[in-house]
Image (spheres, helix red, strand yellow):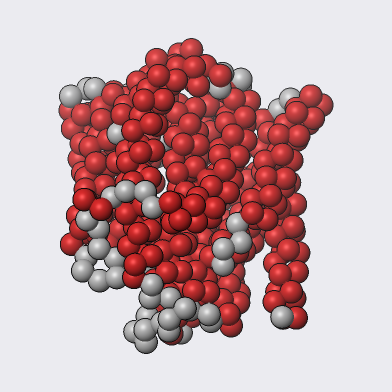
Amino acid sequence: MQTQTKDNPITQGVIWKQLLLFFFPILIGTFFQQLYNTVDSVIVGQFVGKEALASVGGSSAQIVTLVVGFFTGLSSGAAVTIAQFFGAQDEKSANQGLHNAYALSLTAGIILTAIGIVLTPSMLRLMNTPEDILSDSIIYLRIYFAGIIFVLIYNMGSAILRATGDSKRPLYYLIVCCGINIVLDILFVVGFQMGVTGAASATLIAQAASAFLVTFKLLRCRGILSLSLRKIRFHAPILKHQLRLGLPTGFESILFAITNIAIQSAVNTFGTDTAAAWSAFGKLDAIFWMVSTAFGISITTFVGQNYGAGKMDRVRKSTRVCLLIDLIVSVFLVIFLVAARAFLFRLFTSDAEVIRIGCDMLLLITPWYVVYVFIEVLAGSLRGAGNVIVPVVITLVGVCIMRIIWLAVVLKVSPTLSSIIFSYPVTWILTALAFILYYIHKEREHARQ
């Protein structure tokens, strides 16, 4: 590997300072990305009704999470390879990785659009989606799939920019596009009375804008990474490497989504009020996941570049620093969400029963967020070093399989909403312990080398 240039703060600067400087644009960017769907939920919940709220944020949101989560996993594989090539200053491999990533995005987008539009009704019915929200859920999801290619391009392009240490431009693009989404939501839903169709259409247009902006930036780059539309193609060795790192993480996301779909299906059996409350809670729950994801992306990039540059001391230290900061932030988030829960739910609906159910959900889940910190940071650190298989296996067993077993066994004994919800803290604790033990094992293994 070639020596890393001196002006790269990720491999040279003060770790805690550079980590936070990298983290905050990602966090704010993730916040604005989440606003796409949250704004839809708030506006349709307030101006259309709780049925529309459940349509936008219930089963539809879980299916979107499954599809986009899988591709985000693939994007992480591309980002890790590019971060390592960038850290080693391997310009040829980095550029091949960039063009291969775009070829992957375009191909996957076309395939998913066709499959998603056709299978939407079947997927929603498999999830026990209540009949009174099924029609609107189909409309919302089909429009979303019609524009999913834009989602994939933006996610891949922004992952590539962050892999090179640029976490600010994806943020700027999201701020602009979130503004577009809000304006169009108000225009289509409130002004033109288009309901769920208007909310979905506003999101599609905004996501198209974000895909254009990130692609335009990469086309104008003249450094180590420079996108050329004529060079977009698959490069077999790079594709193999990216898939080797990305597919396990993608399947991990699918497994998470499948377990969440199973939980959504169980929640749906309690009726529209509970489905609407779960939908609103999902948007508040996303506040934590925005922070968690931002730390995960940050540590993956830090470890990837330092690992590529051969700086193992910084790999270990950045992991410890990221854990500490994430724990502190998560504690404050828990306090905020618990204290403001009633007010936050009223942003989505004025229905008293929906608010009551949602507040009960929040109190049962949020205190356990601090446990998940260990899963996110340690898994991100291991991915950055190219170790993806074992983290996926730990997640598969600890979160996904154990959660399905919990639902199958406990619901037969106690078929209540609280029994469903407790599957989260139980599986988080088991998985976090497994990650801690495995990471300590790997540290000792490196020390002996």
Q: Nearer the viewer, residue 168 or 101?
A: 101
Looking at the image, residue 91 sits to the left or right of residue 306; the answer is left
Front residue of 251/259: it is 251
Q: Residue at x 25, y 71 (%)?
A: 223
The residue at the far front in this view is 236
Judge whether residue 349 can be spotted in this image: no
Tell me residue 445's x, y (percent). Answer: 74, 74
Q: Would residue 38 be found to the left or right of residue 374 on screen?
A: left
Q: Position of residue 339 (x, y in %)?
A: 53, 52
The residue sitting at 32% across, 38% down in the picture is: 149
Return the residue nearer the eye: 380 or 222.
Answer: 222
Q: Between 47 and 314, which is closer to the camera in this rendering?
A: 314
**If the image is split into quadrants, where does the C terminus sit?**
bottom right
Q: Residue at x 24, y 22 (%)?
A: 194
Establish if 111 lies above or below 335. above
Task: Indicate whether 34 appears above or below 319.
Answer: above
From the top left corner, tell me how far across and down residue 276 is, in percent: 49, 28
Q: Residue at x 37, y 80 (%)?
A: 8
Tell me the quarter of the picture where residue 271 sits: top right
- Which image quadrant for residue 349? top left
